[in-house]
Amino acid sequence: MLPDFGDRVGLVVAIGVLNNDEIAGLEWLSLRKARQVLTYPHDREVLDRFQARVDNVAYRSVASIAVRHGKAAAPSEGSGPDATRPLVGRGEKQAASSASGIAAFRPQKLISSTAARCRATIQPVSVLLGLRVSESDRISQDAWENGEADVAHVVAKRITKRKTAVLCSHGPVLPEIIRQLAYQTNTPLDAPLRSSAELSTGDYTVVHLARERPDAGIIAVETHGPVL
């Protein structure tokens, strides 16, 4: 995500040596001036790839944030339906730890599986942002196992809306969420993209789509987790 300076695009360039013996200072430069400052070819290649996105108006993004619920009680520990399994203490800590990172992307929509463990995982984000959580059985594990899930519909709506949203779901469902994001944006489902769906409890993957260029497909993917 870039600072919004209207039509100007800035880049932070580190030069020389600071207290850590690697960085002397931070400076905002135009892309043209930044390329003149950079000395390593591989750094210029990174800048050139970014320049190409700027030229194609594909550098500002909206995101679909796929979250795996925090650590929950084992199925053997309860007598009720699977969907009622609560978060354990570690899961609650995972949810609290990841909340600020998820909230930093300023999602405008929070969607959760109807399972209690998903609702509890997304609740700290809801509190931070003051957003209501919309529950959907279409991305629940029960619906997935019964063949009644409709991940394609949920993903299609988020792509059409072009607003950053959170989808809190389950380990078996997350690969389909990522697959649908790729399929519906004509993005190749390569190995790194597939691996971004293999999340541990409390982890989340941020899939970026170009805000002004629906035809640009997925332009970036990043995966994060709780700090415990």
Image: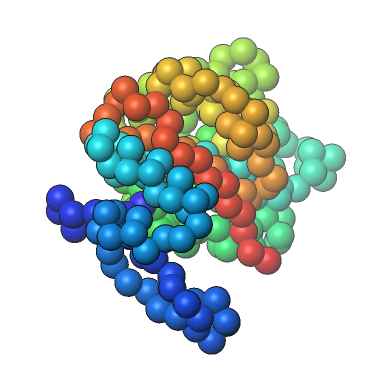
Q: How far from the left and from the top, in percent, is residue 184?
A: 42, 18
Number of numbered discs: 0
What residue sits 46% from the left and 60% below the top? Answer: 39
Q: How far from the left and from the top, in percent, is residue 210?
A: 32, 35
Q: Is residue 24 above or below residue 198?
A: below
The image quadrant that residue 25 belongs to is bottom left
Furthest toward the bottom, the residue is 19
In the picture, which quadrant includes the C terminus? Answer: bottom right
Q: Let me know if residue 64 appears in the view.
A: no
Q: Is residue 7 above or below residue 145?
A: below
Q: Is residue 210 above or below residue 40?
A: above
Q: Is residue 110 above or below residue 81?
A: below
Q: Let me know if residue 26 appears in the view.
A: yes
- 36 and 91: which is toward the camera: 36
The image quadrant that residue 171 belongs to is top right
- 223 and 2: which is toward the camera: 2
Furthest toward the right, the residue is 76
In the image: residue 93, left or right of residue 43? right
What residue sits 43% from the left and 50% below the top? Answer: 44
What residue sits 46% from the left and 45% below the top? Answer: 45
- 55 and 125: which is toward the camera: 55
Q: How far from the left and from the top, in percent, is residue 30?
A: 25, 58
Furthest toward the left, the residue is 6
Colour scheme in the image? Answer: rainbow
In the image: residue 132, left or right of residue 24? left
What residue sits 50% from the left and 83% below the top? Answer: 18
